[in-house]
Image (cartoon, rainbow, N blue to C red):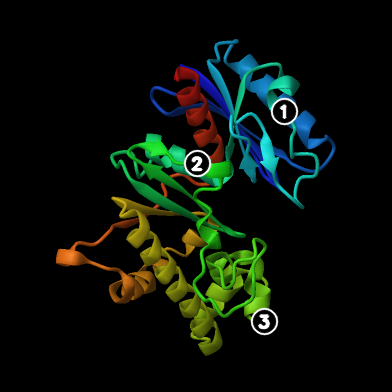
Amino acid sequence: MNAIGIDLGGTWIKGVLMDIDTGEVVKQLYHPTTGEKDWKQAVFETVANLRDHSQGLVEAVGLSAPGLPNETNQYIAFMPVRLSGLEGFHWGHFLNDTVHVINDAHAALVAESRFGIAKSYRNVVMLTLGTGVGGGILIDGKLYQGNFQKAGHVGHIAVDGESVQDVTGMPGSLEDAIGNATIEKRSLGRFTSTYELLEAYKKGDYFAQWLWLSSVRKLAVGISSLINCFSPDLVVLGGGITQAENDLLLPLAEFMNLYEWRPGGQTTPIKIAQFGDMAGAIGAASFAIQRSIV
């Protein structure tokens, strides 16, 4: 079975043609979101190119995007500020096909649970650490989208109730504590990216070490809180910040030793996601097949 998955982001449109039985990516395409073409037209042409490559044998089309899908996963119902024109845009009508629309972080979790690091687990919490902090929740092998499709927005849990409010009104959110979007503010203008922060951290810059470890400590507090709420079999970390690898995982493990509730000495494993920047597209294709079968 072949499926098309599209990941619509603020920078890139990524498309895959997948053999959904094996997980093999038969073909993948990239297109800048801004440039010569309107991004809607770029999505249209990406789907058409992938369909041509499959010689028309496509069982389902999925699209991942930032924001909250409507209750039937036909379009993004709420996505303020970014990608003007996305809210309420009906992709099925535009592409003249049934299109299953999913939040981008939810799509990453679907990809990991179907073909990636979480394949053998039934209950999973995923956090995507990038410009912001997104996530998803898998319960008994199924993606939990929740009321208004808001479930899994783990970046908007509070890790410091006395701090400033984030875009959702949450004070001291996990997203503000470690997301790349706030690094300049958190570093008092010294760093413009988490990459710059980590380079200084590795060189022994005391301010950078304090700032990074403070962020990782709050991440551990957030993960421990999620473990207390959902008791997952596995926590998966994805997103660009996970490229820090041991600079993230080693201090995170130390803080988890402090904060994780471990009755009987049982710990919850934390693993880095298998898929990189194509996770959204792979997850969108997988989600589309799941919805088509239902």
Above or below — where is 129 with respect to 4? below
Q: Which marked residue is nearer to the observer: mark 1 or mark 2?
A: 2
The residue nearer to you, when weighing 207 against 169, is 169
Above or below — where is 165 with respect to 96? below
Distance from the alpha carbon under mark 3 to that under mark 1:
43 Å
The residue nearer to you, when weighing 211 against 25, is 211
The residue that mark 2 highlights is 145
The residue nearer to you, when weighing 13 against 177, is 177
Task: Please report whichever mark, 3 or 2, sits nearer to the chain's N-terminal start.
Answer: 2
Position in image of residue 21 (x %, y %)? 39, 22
Q: Which residue, as the protein is rendered here, is positioned at the far right?
A: 36
The residue that mark 1 highlights is 90
Residue type at mark 1: give it: His
Distance from the alpha carbon under mark 1 to that under mark 2:
19 Å
Residue shown at the point (46%, 73%) measured from the top left: 218
Q: Is residue 56 left or right of residue 80?
A: left
The residue that mark 3 highlights is 190
Q: Which mark is residue 61?
A: none
Q: Element at badge 3?
A: loop
Q: Which marked residue is nearer to the observer: mark 3 or mark 1?
A: 1
Position in image of residue 102 (x %, y %)? 57, 36
